[in-house]
Image (cartoon, rainbow, N blue to C red):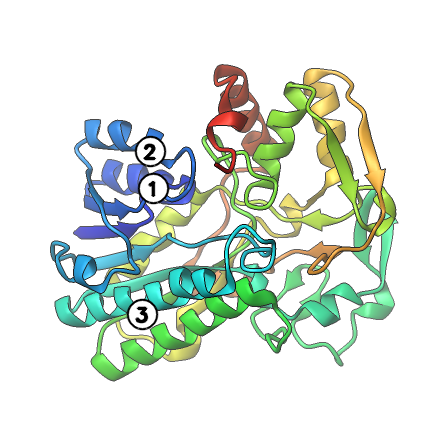
Amino acid sequence: MRILITGICGFVGSTVARALHAAGHQVTGFDNYIRPGSETNTAPLAKLGIKVLTADLRDAAAMAALPAADFVVDAAANPSVLAGVDGKTSSKELVDHNLTGTINVLEYCKAHRAGFILLSTSRVYSIAPLAGLAVAAVDHAFRPSPQSLTPSVPGLSPAGLGESFPTTAPISLYGATKLASEAMALEYGETFGFPVFINRCGVLAGAGQFGRADQGIFAYWINAWLRKRPLKYLGFGGLGHQVRDCLHPRDLVPVLEKQFKAPKLPVADRLANFSGGAASAMSLRQLSDWCAARFGPHTVAQDGTPRPFDIPWIVLDHARASALWDWQPATPTTAILEEIAVHAEQHPGWLELSAPR
């Protein structure tokens, strides 16, 4: 099958590209190289026989000139929840990249009758009920208190957030661009008759992820710990108890292949969470303990000052994905961390390579 991957030289795009190529698909992709470090993936992908083009999904003319494909996997985005408000990118730039860009890709799918798979995010879920969640620290990690798990908040259980959890504002400008992209994708698919799937992903991590605290916290923390760079627990008392789940993007490939071949499904069955789930969940403090055991001790500063968009616990429940697609995450968190650690040891300049310029 002919697969087109947007953002192919990013961590997720390049990882998925390699796996789909290995599975026998004809893979082409494009990138605008806006993210520092992405240029390092071009030659290795090309060496495998994967065609890598230079294009910007915000450029409608460039999108129209791309070769035809049977399916598009959209792995391009500014993935930081602080994007558009941190002074590094403008709100207009964020919307142009994450939403206008998606519409240009959907126009491509319309023209070529290509299917579309959006790799979306857990950040489409509402901040207010998550920020106000009653939590208790257990083994240096937050967990929802039993009193929080009530029917008054739909889609919330010890297994994580289900797809029925609220997506009402505020969800951050970044989350809003992804939620709007989801809606536009489903509408385009229904209106113009091509298959669309929305895969809401938890935190994606693995070797080769760029070392940015706002985009790849696991990779950043491990690389910084190894090199004894300053690290700091931010918010929540400065204790590092905040929790996220963890998924390797290659674990998405089995479901992508099923989606390529899937018959027409009801709209409700085209959207699902994909995550490492509760079994993969880890706090920053627990990540530090792992780093200390792997690399030796390092001091982490404490700063309990609250920050916008901070959430104490966000774990996605992938039960719907398991039921719809017979899918389970395959790579345990410890294996992901070790993979990142080995890569960090082999690439001493990784933080500099992927630092903002």
For marks 3 and 1, give the CA distance.
20 Å
Mark 2 Cα within 10 Å, few/some/many (few <14, many 20+)? some
Considering only vertical position in the picture, is 4 above or below 342? below
Considering only vertical position in the picture, is 28 above or below 348? below
Residue 35 is drawn in which quadrant? top left
Residue 230 placement (x, y as % from top left): 72, 27
The label on residue 39 is 2
Residue 338 placement (x, y as % from top left): 57, 25
Q: Tell me the mark number nearer the camera, choosing from 3 and 1.
A: 1
Seen from the viewer's position, the closer of residues 14 and 59 is: 59
Residue drawn at x 78%, y 69% is 149
For the residue marked with disc 1, what is the amino acid? Answer: Tyr
Considering only vertical position in the picture, is 241 above or below 346? below
Mark 3 Cα within 10 Å, few/some/many (few <14, many 20+)? many
Q: Earlier in the sequence, mark 3 or mark 1?
A: 1
Residue drawn at x 46%, y 65% is 92
Residue 12 placement (x, y as % from top left): 41, 44
Q: Look at the numbered discs 2 and 1 and tell me whether their residues touch, using CB distance below 8 Å.
A: yes
Left-right relation of 177 to 140 = left
Q: Earlier in the sequence, mark 2 or mark 1?
A: 1
Could you tell me if residue 323 is visible in this image? no
Residue that badge 3 annotates: 103
